[in-house]
Image (tube, helix red, strand yellow):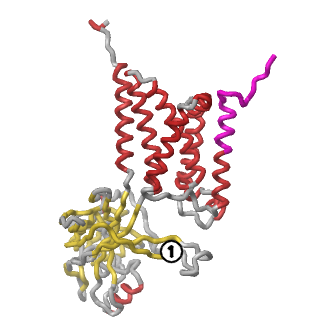
Amino acid sequence: MQKNNLWRMPFGYTPTSIIIVGFILVGFALEIATNGNGFPKPIAPVNIFLILMYLVFLTIVYFIKPLRKLINWFSSITLAVTSVTVFILLIAVAGFIPQGGTENILFLKKIGFTHMITSWPYVISLLFVCTSLFYTVLKKLVNFKIRHIGFLLNHIGFFIILFFGSLSVGHLETYNIELFIDSPTHQGFYFDKLRANETLEFPGQQFIKRTVNLPFSLKMKRFEIDNYPSEILFYDSLGYPIKTKLKKEAGFIEKGRIFHFEDWEITVEKYLESATPRKEDFIPYGMDCDHPAFMSAAYLKARNVLTKEEKEGWVTCGNIRDHSPEIARMLMRLKYFFPTTYLDIGENSLTIGQPGKKRFASYVTMLTPEGEKIEKIVEVNKPFKYKSWYLYQTDCRYILVYPESTDPLRISTLQAVKDPWLKFVYIGFFMLLTGVVQMIWPIRKFPKDGK
């Protein structure tokens, strides 16, 4: 009786798993050999040439008869299931281990776990999955029938999502842009990660700021910011915060609002979102909530419902926050550095918190290379799209241009992201969805006459 040969075509799950895992181990070995630098990212037009070469090579191999068994294995369910399983496991590693955030753990970096999406094992696994999909699709195209349309749309869409989605990760351009009011700029910057031991130009540094010229210029006309109201905060006799059952909106300060805390009834008599102190009270003062000197103030009345004891007074969140040393010195030099103030109620105390940022937006004018002027509002979660570029509002802050300055300048920070392959990923999702609909629709057949 002839024994089954494990390595006889077509391969089963065991030899297929051994082959794929073996190639993945080779990928980890390449990561170690290259000191964890990952797969080199070819730039255009080299990347496009490599893609075309890859697709042409697979097509030519398909029509070579002596390799028919190998092609059948690549298009088999066995390889598809095994390669996708390994691919998902590698993606899971990227989900559980912070990418780029564990550089201090050298072993994880050297084997590619801190940059999994651009590592050698990931690229090898991706090639197995994409090759399997390619040959599966090519088989159906060679023997095309109308009923295969849904199948083809699904698999081609999945191939495009995986292939071009991975290219998108490798060729994503991300730059920060700092804007001042009425100061046009065409420059962005990024932080280049350095290895101190290998970079003689910048010894001892881990990051260096590098600038790039963008294909457009931006000018900020104005900046707007909306705030949430301050929240009421309670503290015990040792200064520790006391948790209450109030939800965020229920804890917002508003004139005339009444809060209950233990035996006390607190009434908000006045609330100034932006205030400046006088000798005994506060008056309105127009400042945004991110201004270094900004503070909110409220006049509160507290009454103990049991003892009838009453307390009242002004409380403020103060403007002593996490300022830069330059900003803090400016506030102290101007004698405008005020701490948080409290109102004592029994053994506890209360005050108000710093208002949160509800919305902030930059009103910008873009000048394109063609001389076109485009005016847009860029705000959080509402990006501005220009060709393959997306502009996101990410931050706003104040800085001192000169050490002795008394007038800090606002900086609005935008993030410019260019993803040339994103449109192909969208096409892949559309094909995948269309294929699913096409495969489901023929199933919806209902018998005539309700039978």
- The image quadrant of residue 9 is top right
> Which of the image's four quarters has the N terminus?
top right
Q: Is residue 65 above or below residue 315?
A: above
Quickly name the residue at label 1: 207
- The image quadrant of residue 152 is top left
- In front of the other: 336 or 212: 212
Q: As drawn, is 84 to the left or to the right of 435?
A: right
Q: Is residue 5 magenta?
A: yes
Q: Position of residue 224 (x, y in %)?
A: 22, 69
The amino acid marked with disc number 1 is: Phe
Q: Is residue 365 above or below residue 132?
A: below
Q: Which residues fall within the magenta stretch?
A: 1-22
Q: As drawn, is 32 to the left or to the right of 157?
A: right
- CA neighbours of label 1 inside 10 A, class few (<14), some (14 to 19), many (20+): some
Q: Position of residue 116 (x, y in %)?
A: 56, 54
Q: Is residue 187 magenta?
A: no
Q: Position of residue 265 (x, y in %)?
A: 29, 65
Report the residue at 47% width, 50% height from top. Answer: 166
